Image (cartoon, rainbow, N blue to C red):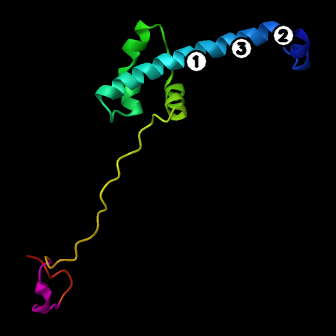
């Protein structure tokens, strides 16, 4: 093992620390995903931003802490981000609701004379 670590110019200690850190992060991610899935069971359309603000009390009970960007990256990695609902297309209505032109009957002789 020390020979392999020598090739990569790192110590055995650094290798095992990285391995331990990755396992800790994976355990934390699994616990957060478990909480997210439980919350989504009750509220299926709850978005990531609201989840991030509602989960901290439960995270602190478990001794976990996760920042916003890492939380969003975790949800993105596991495809748990919600797509926005597609809105109905708004088109113009070309119906006959316009008012008649009353200026056709009026003689305009001076500027700023058309007032009611």
Q: Main secondary structure of the magenta part?
A: loop
Residue identifier under label 2: 11
Q: Earlier in the sequence, mark 2 or mark 3?
A: 2
Q: Position of residue 98 (x, y in %)?
A: 15, 78
Tag 3 and tag 1, C-beta contact below 8 Å: no
Magenta-highlighted residues: 98-109
Name the disc covering residue 18, or none: 3
Q: Spatial distance from mark 1 to mark 2, Cα to Cα? A: 23 Å
Q: Earlier in the sequence, mark 3 or mark 1?
A: 3
Q: Spatial distance from mark 2 to mark 3, Cα to Cα? A: 11 Å
Closer to the camera in the image, 73 or 99? 73
Tag 2 and tag 3, C-beta contact below 8 Å: no
Name the disc covering residue 26, or none: 1
What residue is drawn where x is 15% and y is 79%?
A: 96
Q: Does 55 sit left or right of 31 as displayed?
A: left
Indicate whether 20 appears above or below 37: above
| Eye-nearest disc, 3 or 1 | 1
Res 59 quadrant in image: top left
Q: Position of residue 32 (x, y in %)?
A: 46, 19
What residue is drawn where x is 51% and y is 22%?
A: 67
Q: Position of residue 113 (x, y in %)?
A: 15, 82
């Amino acid at each position: 093992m020390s020979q392999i670590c020598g090739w990569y110019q790192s110590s055995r200690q650094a290798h095992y620390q990285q391995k331990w850190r990755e396992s800790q992060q994976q355990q934390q991610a699994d616990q957060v995903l478990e909480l997210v899935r439980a919350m989504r069971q009750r509220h299926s359309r709850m978005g990531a931003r609201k989840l991030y603000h509602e989960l901290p009390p439960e995270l602190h009970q478990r001794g976990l802490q996760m920042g916003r960007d890492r939380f969003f990256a975790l949800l993105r990695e596991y495809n748990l981000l919600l797509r926005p609902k597609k809105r109905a297309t708004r088109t113009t209505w070309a119906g006959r609701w316009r008012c008649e032109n009353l200026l056709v009957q009026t003689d305009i002789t001076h500027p700023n004379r058309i007032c009611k």
